[in-house]
Amino acid sequence: MTIRVMLVDDQVLLRTGFRMVLAAQPDMEVVAEAGDGVEALQVVRSTAVDVVLMDVRMPKLDGVEATRRICAEAHPPKVLILTTFDLDEYAFSGLKAGASGFMLKDVPPGELLAAIRSVHSGDAVVAPSTTRRLLDRFAPMLPATGTQPQHKELERLTEREREVMVLVAQGLSNGEIAARLVLSEATVKTHVGRILTKLGLRDRVQVVVLAYETGLVRAGGHG
């Protein structure tokens, strides 16, 4: 299956560079480009796109707001935010807006391609260093230690699902969770799918945000 990618960046040179990298991949195709958020939203509505590579700082409509609007569409593509600025507020805002990942533009091509494939398959992609600083930075805005989860939907989770959710929120991959809980990776994937369905969440990023917002997990990574 070919992954249909859209490039959104106000710098033509950067879009050209990304297009050359993606065009060399047998499983990827650049199907559209846009120079700002307004154009991106128009193109998404008329073109079949699987993954959007979204710049943050753009004229007319920035990448965070464009991401929010794209993710509100009926059948939205996955959004991977790319920026030259490793700033926590962009990461937090972008993920809250619905992005499935956040990476720096100077990421090695191999990592970018892996990120696109991961996001397309339903996994979240956030640079570990960004995640740690993001959670440290926003810890004061999150529930205090000892706060019980307030999201009533969490009560629908089994004990095992809650356990898996905590590990997802700590940034562990399915393979790492499987090793930690001595389960098969397929079983972990099933648990993650049930968590998403029961809580009405789109992907692992939303699991992370909800886990911290409800106090199920606290900054520092402890459930």
Image (cartoon, rainbow, N blue to C red):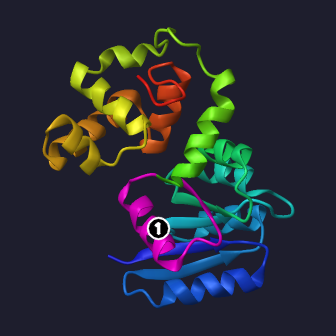
Figure label count: 1
Q: Is residue 72 visible?
A: no
Residue 52: % across, % down: 57, 65
In the image, residue 99 above or below residue 177:
below
Magenta stretch encompasses residue 115: yes
Q: Residues within 10 Å of mark 1 (few under 14, many from 20)?
A: many
Label 1 sits on a secondary structure element that is helix
Residue 133 falls left or right of residue 164 = right
Viewport quadrant of the N terminus: bottom left
Residue 61 visible to an observer of this rendering? yes
Q: How far across and down, in percent of the image, does residue 47 sit?
A: 56, 71
Q: Position of residue 200 (x, y in %)?
A: 41, 32
Q: Nearer the viewer, residue 155 or 168?
A: 168
In depth, the one of 68 and 56 nearer the eye is: 56
In the image, what residue occupies the spot 24% across and 19% down? Answer: 159
Q: Which residue is drawn at the image coordinates 60% and 81% (left, top)?
A: 18
Q: Examine the rendered structure and indicate whether residue 199 appears above or below residue 133.
A: above
Residue 80's spot in the image, x, y percent?
56, 60
Circle 1 residue: 116
Q: Is residue 53 magenta?
A: no
Instruction: Place residue 6 in its image quadrant.
Output: bottom right
The amino acid type found where label 1 is placed reads: Ile
Q: Quadrant of residue 119?
A: bottom left
195 lies above or below 93: above
In percent of the image, x 40 and y 18: which residue is there?
153
Quadrant that contains the C terminus: top left
**Residue, x 67% and y 87% (percent of image)?**
16
- Residue numbers of the magenta segment: 100-124
The outermost residue toward the right is 59
